[in-house]
Image: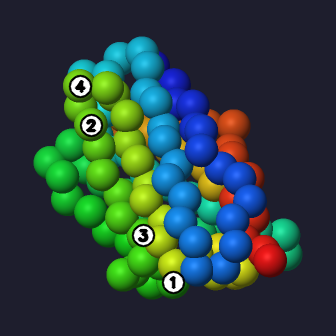
Amino acid sequence: QVQVAESGGGLVQPGGSLRLSCLASGNIASLNAMGWYRLAPGKQRELVARITTGDSTNYGDSVKGRFTISRDNAKNTVYLQMNNLKPEDTAVYYCIANYGSNSLVSWGQGTQVTVSL
């Protein structure tokens, strides 16, 4: 199994930046990809960004050009750098890990990001 835990959320003004971190633990060798989803009140869950073990990335349309996903293999950590934040980015951000030959998924507890004056 793989477990993930997020950190780094908080309150930021529009136009500001935040970096989220996601630490993976457990059977790291079985990882296929890690990523971030977000869930805002009244909205559907949305893919934010995803990165594979081969460093292939993809982003949700609403964050392209503003958010960057990266990983540090030595630290078993994936980062989400969020720039030029907008009020509509306000949500709970969840880290996920896709692992194993059956593509199982682990979810973190979530971290709140609030973009407001």
**CB under 8 Å between callouts 4 and 2?**
yes
- In this rendering, is residue 72 above or below 9? above
Q: Which residue is mark 2?
A: 72
**CB under 8 Å between callouts 3 and 4?**
no
> Quarter holding the C terminus?
bottom right
Which badge, 2 or 3, is on the more N-terminal residue? 3
Residue 94 in the image, given as x and y percentages of width and height: 61, 49
Q: Residue at x 35, y 58 (%)?
A: 69
The Cα atoms of the two marked residues, 2 and 1, are separated by 25 Å
Outermost residue to the top: 26
- Which quarter of the figure has residue 74? top left
Counting other residues with Cα less than 10 Å from the Cα at mark 3, is it few (<14), some (14-19), or many (20 or more)?
A: many
**CB under 8 Å between callouts 2 and 1?**
no
- In this rendering, is residue 16 above or below 50? below
**CB under 8 Å between callouts 1 and 3?**
no
- Foreground label between 1 and 3: 3
Q: Which residue is mark 1?
A: 62
The Cα atoms of the two marked residues, 4 and 2, are separated by 6 Å
Which badge, 1 or 4, is on the more N-terminal residue? 1
Judge left or right: residue 26 versus residue 92: left
Judge left or right: residue 93 versus residue 96: right
Q: Which residue is mark 3?
A: 67
Q: Amino acid at mark 1?
A: Ser
Counting other residues with Cα less than 10 Å from the Cα at mark 1, is it few (<14), some (14-19), or many (20 or more)?
A: few
Q: Is residue 17 visible?
A: yes
Secondary structure category for the residue under label 3: strand
Q: Nearer the viewer, residue 36 or 21?
A: 21
Q: Nearer the viewer, residue 103 or 79?
A: 79
- Which quarter of the figure has residue 98? top left
Residue 100 in the image, given as x and y percentages of width and height: 33, 30
- Foreground label between 2 and 1: 2
Q: Which residue is mark 4?
A: 74
